[in-house]
């Protein structure tokens, strides 16, 4: 993993990029140097998202597949056939990994300033009395997966986007 410039992806300035084209078992994640002025939880979400991209790349190279999905090659091939070469990983993540990402964020948040987050006026205006809903981490997990079929049909997507915009993006605790 490194910090540096990242190329635009479909016209967007991305938070990070995972490159699996460097040779067998050489996967490089680059965190966009221009996108590090965010809160620690948002950066953690980006890292987890990119690590899953890396695991998907790695699992595609292994005959035995992935530990989280014993039928990974067969299942992933369906995504590749349905969504083309460029986007199957986001569709796969949207259907299979959102809860895993949410659980990882819930577990790491106490180490990334959860108490400060809860007491932040911006967060309190959205979640009064420190009542962060159980779906908050699921909302975070969906960031970066918008535009997938699962996201587009999710009735909570607008709420999730609002929670992210009104809390995490305004949380002042920087990542060290």
Image: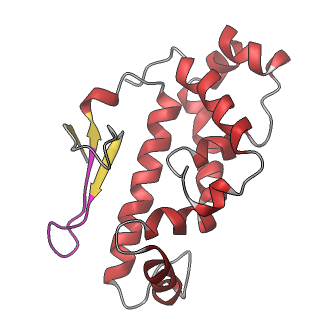
Q: Residue at x 31, y 82 (%)?
A: 61
Q: Nearer the viewer, residue 115 or 72?
A: 72
Q: Quadrant of residue 167?
A: top right
Above or below residue 131? Residue 143 is below
Please give the range of residues in magenta.
19-30
Left or right of 70? Residue 33 is: left
Above or below residue 27? Residue 34 is above
Left or right of 25? Residue 46 is: right
Q: Residue at x 49, y 47 (%)?
A: 144
Q: Quadrant of residue 70?
A: bottom right
Left or right of 41? Residue 96 is: right
Q: Nearer the viewer, residue 171 or 105?
A: 171
**Residue 45: percent from the left, percent from the top?**
50, 42
Dominant secondary structure (helix, strand or loop) of the stretch shown in magenta: loop
Q: Residue at x 34, y 29 (%)?
A: 35
Magenta region includes residue 16: no
Q: Is residue 46 visible?
A: yes
Quadrant in which the C terminus appears: top left
Above or below residue 134? Residue 132 is above
């Amino acid at each position: 993993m490194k910090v540096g410039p990242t190329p635009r992806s479909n016209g967007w300035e991305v938070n990070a990029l995972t490159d699996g084209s460097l040779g067998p078992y050489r996967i490089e994640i680059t965190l966009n140097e221009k996108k590090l002025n965010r809160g620690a939880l948002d950066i953690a979400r980006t890292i987890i998202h990119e690590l899953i991209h890396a695991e998907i790349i790695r699992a595609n190279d292994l005959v035995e597949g992935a530990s989280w999905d014993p039928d990974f090659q067969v299942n992933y091939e369906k995504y590749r056939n349905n969504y083309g070469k460029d986007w199957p990983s986001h569709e796969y993540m949207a259907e299979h990994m959102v809860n895993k990402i949410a659980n990882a964020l819930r577990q790491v948040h106490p180490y990334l300033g959860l108490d400060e987050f809860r007491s932040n006026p911006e967060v309190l205006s959205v979640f009064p009395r420190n009542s962060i809903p159980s779906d908050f981490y699921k909302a975070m997990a969906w960031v970066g997966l918008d535009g997938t079929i699962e996201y587009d049909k999710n009735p909570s997507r607008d709420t999730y986007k609002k929670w992210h915009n009104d809390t995490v993006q305004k949380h002042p605790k920087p990542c060290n």
